[in-house]
Amino acid sequence: MASHSSAVPVLPAPAQNRDRVRRDFNQALTVTVFLLPAGLIFTVFLIFPIVQAAYFSLFKWNGLGPPENFIGLENYLRLFQDKVFRGALLHNLLIIFLSLGVQLPISLGLALLVWRKLPGRVFFRTVFFLPYVLSEVITGIIWLFIYHPEFGLVTTLFKSLLPGLTTSWLGDPRTALNAIFVVLCWKYFGFYLILYLAGLQQIPAELEEAARIDGASDAQVLRYVILPLLGSILRLTIYLSILGSLQIFVLVWVMTQGGPVQSSNTMATYLFKFGFQRFALGYGSTVAVVLFLIGLGFSAAYQRAVLQQDYVGGVG
Amino acid sequence: MKVLHRLISLTCLCMLVLAACGPAATTVAPTEAPAPTTAVEPTEEAPAPTTAPNKVKITWWHITTDDKGKAYWQSVADAYMADHPNVAIEITVMDNEQFKQKLATVMQSGEPPDLFQSWGGGVMNAYAEGGLLKDITSDIEGEWKDSFAPGPLAVYSYNGKQYGVPWDMGMVGFWYNKALFAQAGIDAPPQTWSELLDAVKKLKAAGIIPIALGGKDKWPGHFWWVYLAVRLGGQPAFDAAYSRSGSFADETFVKAGEKLKELIDLEPFEDGFLGLGYNDQAALMGNGKAALELMGQWAPGAQAGNAEDKIGIGEDLGFFPFPKVEGGVGEASDAMGGGNGIAVGKNAAPEAVDFLRYLTTSDHQRAMAEQGLAVPVVKGAEDGIKDPLLKEVQATLGKAKYFQLYYDQYLPPAVGDAVKDATEGLFAGTLSPEEAAQMIEDSASTELSSN
């Protein structure tokens, strides 16, 4: 045993170095070989298309044949001067605002309700999660019927209860976006609810008990014990909600196609309409690049400023 | 917990394995893909000695989704394949919107189907310019070419080259419910725009929805504005704007918006029409709830298909052309509309063109006319039309000296969409007639100048 282990230091220095070099090389080789498949996929399907889109965005190009008409940054200028695009951007921001201000609080409130005390809470949890299971297209079609201006459920309800307030929810430029937001809320609150429930399960009951023994009221328990311990989940849901709101497409497309008169466009429906449908792939790529930069910029900033603490095992 | 841990690592492992397979799978795909094309070539050069020769494959996309039409196309393809055992025709049937989106995608990847639905005009021209269509000018020369009515055939040519052939051609006009007109005390179909406005007022007073309109789909609404422009300015106004010696912001097009606004201000459409589509429009007509709609030759079929009883209003349905507009220079006989045709993709084999010839023989055209599937475009097939309304459409169309293809198909895609967006703004009351015309001109000025 002793003689065996002493054999290593006896080796001459160059040999030892060579050994380490070989070991390092082997290690690097292993890492490379294991990373190669994933790296290749990442490059081919992610990096390459982004670079390609950035390149196409400098052309006036209809997508048929190779791009030839180089116009520099003209597409970008046109994009930012377009009222319809600014409207779409504003709609995305509005949905973000409504999601954070309305959807997440509703989810959190319901999560707190069905967490422990409510009888039949398992039933409620299942019911609340159901809309999330439906595909977006199916959700859109169901709600087209619910909002139908002739025989829809919502229309009938309003006609019998508040006849003065009734309107064609999806056919009125003033209400279309909000009507879609209601559907978004309905579809996704269950998802956030499940995340909150998972977070709440992690909070030890002793902490709450201890606070109550110290004389904390319900509100104080919520404010000083539960919410801080739920911090990492709250930060995560805000992140997911904002990113999701930036990417909304299917539901809007199925329900209004961004109309009436562009009143419910998002950046993604704008891209599809003005890029694909109008055979302007160069311009469409410009929209894609801008959408990508907004998403990336937000994501990087939020990760750095907010989510960092959760990664290094901070609070929560 | 330990089980969960293992599960997670197993999942990760699976993902790694899958990831490792990824690039391998993509390198396999290309070697598989060209196989059919290389398999096709031998049949052209040297017939295979075996008893099962490689077949020539023809892919065909069409949008005739109703059962009768779908079955008819299939029977024609089957008959052709029985006569030509070396040909295999693969038909894909899609719904209109779905087809447009899927076609745009395959076109951008440069792989068009051999035969596919086309309305001609600006969209087809864009494909032709991209080198995605097959030039069949020399194929149709002679008897085949002479069998067509020249107007419809010209829709499928661009810069003197033929890229497809028509099989149906019709026009847009008013389809109305005679019973509801009688109920509102209107004795005769309106002859002028102001008579039409009067009729709308009478219908409204009688508690009937005067006009069905699927505003969400936009193209049904754009018919109104285009027809007004056709009646107001005639061919000269459009030709001037299109050739760029004039503009879409000219008086004719602003005035079209003003006339349309006179109608919109009467609120003649169903509740929430901006959020409803063409299917809702057809259902309102088919269920006898609305008095009239401005639509193409396919309207009776669509009304029946969307009606609750699947029959429609039958004998009560009537047709009248778009009325004269006071002060307009366009002739009352001028017509706006379009039809259906089949374009040929760049990779199509000669057999595909031969099948197209077979498909448009006067026998097949007459059979389609008899079943009410098309208003035929081949000479001598008109006598197949049985339906009196379709006969009327065909006769009215025959009298037109100026025929305008729908703007949304005739103009380049971007301008066509601008027309639809602008007219939607008029219907919603968010754009003034001047703003709507300017919006179209803005798009035309960038898109038409570069052509």
Image (cartoon, coloured by chain):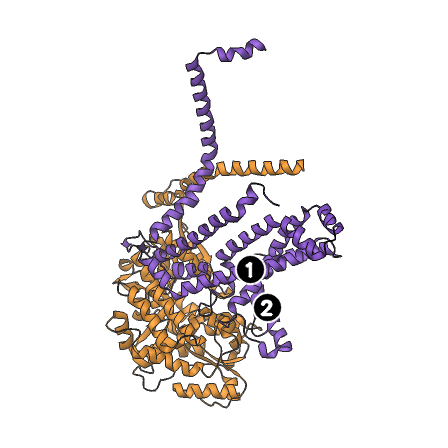
Residue placed at 43% from the left, 25% from the top? A25
**Residue occupying the far front of the picture:** A214
Quick check: B133 above or below B277? above
- Near mark 1 (Cα within 10 A), the count class, few <14, some 14-19 or many ≥20, is many
**Residue occupying the far left of the picture:** B245
Q: Quadrant of the N terminus of chain A?
A: top right
Q: Is residue B326 left or right of residue B189?
A: left
Mark pair 1, 2: CA separation: 22 Å
Describe the element under mark 2 as helix, strand or loop.
Answer: helix
Residue nearest the viewer, comparing A91 with A248 = A91
Q: Which residue is mark 2?
A: A146
Q: Which residue is mark 1?
A: A99
Residue B313 horizontal/vertical position (percent)? 53, 78
Residue nearest the viewer, comparing B204 with A8 = A8
Q: Is residue A262 left or right of residue A74?
A: right
Q: Is residue B6 visible?
A: yes
Q: Which chain is purple?
A: A
